Image: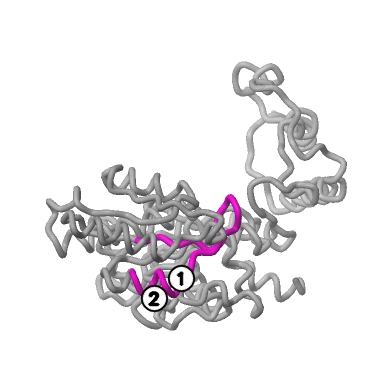
Amino acid sequence: MDNELKPMDAEQLRERAHKMVDFIADYYKNIEDFPVLSQVEPGYLRNLLPESAPHNPESLQSVLDDVQKKIFPGVTHWQSPNYFAYYPSNSSIAGFLGEMLSAAFNVIGFSWVTSPAATELEMIVLDWLAKLLKLPDDFLSSGKGGGVIQGTASEAVLVVLLAARDRALRRFGKDYLKKLVVYASDQTHSALQKACQIGGIHPENCRWLKADISTNYALSPNVLSEELSRDTARGLIPFFLCATVGTTSSTAVDPLPELGSIAKRHEMWFHVDAAYAGSACVCPEYRQYIDGVEEADSFNMNLHKWFLTNFDCSVLWVKDRHALIRSLSTNPEYLKNKASEAELVVDYKDWQIPLGRRFRRHLIPCLNDELQL
């Protein structure tokens, strides 16, 4: 039967992949011709597609025709040179070529044994990047810390908040959850508020401290110190401080050296959210904006903003990977293996919320060398 469902062979893959690449190349060639913001009304697509899935396959050309006629009108073109909303989100040709390669492997690399190259390449590339940023050696995988790719900065701040919470509860006792307090400026990304909700931090113990024009909307160390004094006098327990390098609303930069000293004095976990502006700090002239990261327990930045990398690719470094593992590790019988049991390897399943993870685009630096980007 002509419409029988069969897997593509190698030659069909070549032919269709060329057609797909041509389609994408034409899209990028003409992207400036599209209105940046989609002009459709809510529910537009329902009237253009059938009520149920088709019974028979369609040709690739037919699918691409549908994409052009029905999907393109509903796309907001984030890669357009005329796009200036939210934050930088620029990918690259090398980025989606790396995406093609990792998609072809389709690795579910939750532990080292499931694909050693996926884990080891991620460790190596994130060490490279840490050195490029001149992060302290404590964040390198050769010591007690290391880096990991999370999906978004929201996931990064959640996992470190959970690690900080559990560290505090081990110290003070599990009944002290209601006394734990989080501190950040009111310019901090709402991801921290969501992390607090998920982590069971009482809403009344979340301190969103007012920042204003007098500090260029950065968190004032004096305001923080005053709030800490009030809370400790009431018997509350400060346990987590989040500083931002590049707030979403105004790109404000919190004073890391002063905040780090305060966090150290109060034995708080100090997290630096550089999701927005951290990428710029690979440039020597901007590295000053993360001076003080030496006192941080964790540091996060989004490669999918300024680093020409496809979404989603948010990198997180921690000084103590065992703090993450103690909070997030599960080890049922079906996941056990000799390398993990002997603690010879890193299993990234224990550094994140989900179990499964892709062979992510940490291949891209290798591609960039070849493509001279």
Considering only vertical position in the picture, is 107 above or below 83? below
The quarter holding residue 234 reads bottom left
Residue type at tag 1: Leu
Residue 61 magenta-highlighted: no
Q: Position of residue 141 (x, y in %)?
A: 41, 78
Q: What colour scheme has been applied to the protein in the rendered image?
A: one colour
Residue 295 marker: 2
Q: Dot 1 lies on which element?
A: helix
Tell me where the magenta segment starts and ends, as one range. Answer: 241-262
Residue 258 magenta-highlighted: yes
State which quarter of the image contains the N terminus. top right
Residue type at tag 2: Glu
State which quarter of the image contains the C terminus. bottom right
Q: Where is residue 197 in the image (x, y as percent from the top left)?
A: 33, 43
Considering only vertical position in the picture, is 6 above or below 207? above
In the drawing, does residue 354 fall left or right of residue 244? left
Farthest residue to the front: give it.
Answer: 214
Q: Position of residue 353 (x, y in %)?
A: 37, 52
- Specify few, some or many for label 2: CA neighbours under 10 Å numbering under 14, 14-19, or 20 or more: many
Disc 1 vs disc 2: Cβ atoms closer than 8 Å?
Answer: yes
Considering only vertical position in the picture, is 67 above or below 228? above
Q: Dot 2 lies on which element?
A: helix
Which residue is painted at 74% across and 59% down in the image?
A: 93
Task: Estimate the spatial distance between the alpha carbons at disc 1 and disc 2, rounded to whole Å.
Answer: 8 Å
Q: Where is residue 76 in the image (x, y as percent from the top left)?
A: 71, 38
In the drawing, does residue 25 fall left or right of residue 153? right
Which residue is painted at 65% across and 31% down in the image?
A: 4
Mark 1 vs mark 2: which is more N-terminal?
1
**Which residue is labeled 1 in the image?**
256
